Amino acid sequence: MKIAIVGNGICGITAARLISENSPGAKISIFTDEEYNYYPRPLLDRLLSETMDLNQLFPYNDEWYKKRGIDVFLKTRVVEIPRDYDKVLITTGASPFVPPIEGIKSEEVFTCRNIADVLRIRAFARGKKRAVVIGGGLLGLETAKALTDRGLKVTVIEHNSRLLPKQLDEEGGQILKSRIEKLNIEVVLQVTCDRIMTEGAKTCLLSKQIGKLEADLFIVSAGVRSNIELARNCGIGIEKGIVVDKYMKTSCDRIYAAGDCAEFNGMVYGIIPAAIEQGTVAASNMIDKPLEYKGTTFQATLKVMGIDLTSIGAVNPEGEGYETVCRKDAPKGIYRKCIIKDGRLIGAIVLGEKDGIAGLTRIIKEGIYVTGNKDALLGGEAALAEWA
Amino acid sequence: MDKYRCTVCGYIYDPALGDPTAGIPAGTAFDKLPDSWVCPECGAPKDMFEKV
């Protein structure tokens, strides 16, 4: 069987590995427009802070691909569905969303999504002093920390009323803000970026709330959008992402999609656990071993040294009928919150601590009823054993 | 005891530290972790780790 995979991020590589393991003899071709083999994207902030070298980024050497019958075609942008393959998997991922703001294309403005982006920022940032990160989400904060580690003075602006609007609530956001500020990163909330302008040798961000903010470089971290051009060009059904069914099949026979480019039940997940699970489901179905995808529990961890923060499931549910239990110790930077609906735990925030994250994730994923002393949900693994 | 790296996010499992997020005590070797154990940073399963 000949299989083509377009994209070599975590989703594509997971599928390639599983197909090679479960269907020996399959010929797998991976196409990517990047010039590098698979690398874990979460390591990019370490490449940016130069705490890790480029050559340390690649977990698999040429031998690894060869042994598995995987051919990788680098610097190859795929514009139509490759012919001569029995099955095709589209894992084209997502690209940074760049809001249509005047001046956003200035040479001082960057996005940070792949190795090439990081190397460009590194080269530009040498000898520079001030940076502004536009967007206070997970990646924005991780980028801000990496730039701070490089010796730049960094300001993060976020248009929402709190950092990590998706993963935190207001109280958690306040505690996180003070933790971030202790890292010598300035945080300004409820501020929009309305224009980037150059005045002589200076570049400024213009905001109607705070006026001018001058910096040497600007990083746009305003979320991502699915890469769906290939699917659109080939007449495959798309909405926000490439529409897939529970087998990760697109509207076209023998063509599958998974990961950040795929939309399942109206949702583009854009998180690593979903990329792995969807890649696994797609791989299985492509080798005719039926497997259904049932959705992925949202889970995100902030990877900023010195701050432990994990958010699981629905932490800002809308509507009524929710019960919450909280534990807060602001001076210590600790905040834990669990959200319960109809007797089941549906979401949790764990900030400033680590113990109990695995247990909470399991209770949420398995839909276990949390009867009894709900305050025990705010403890660690030992307390959570009550619902094992 | 060997350290293992997550090939998905780069997290390193260090047996000397264990994994406090999952209540895994310090001194637990990687191959003694339960099969249900996942990467505490990205949720990747155990088979996506490789020896450092």
Image (cartoon, rainbow, N blue to C red):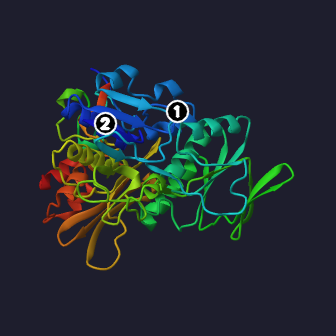
Mark 1 = which residue?
A35
> For residue A238, which quarter of the picture?
bottom left
**Subunit bearing disc 1:** A
Report the residue at 47% width, 41% height from top. Answer: A305
The amino acid type of the residue labelled 1 equals Glu
Q: Is residue A71 left or right of residue A177?
A: left
How many dots with numbers?
2
Report the residue at 13% width, 66% height from top. Answer: A371
Neighbour tally class for label 2: few under 14, some 14-19, many 20 plus, Cα within 10 Å: many
Q: Secondary structure at mark 2?
A: helix
> For residue A318, which quarter of the picture?
bottom left
**Subunit bearing disc 2:** A
Mark 2 = which residue?
A16
The amino acid type of the residue labelled 2 equals Ala
> Is residue A270 visible from the viewing direction of this image?
no
Report the residue at 71% width, 71% height from top. Answer: A208
Q: In x, y percent, where is residue A357?
A: 28, 49
Against A32, is A315 above or below?
below
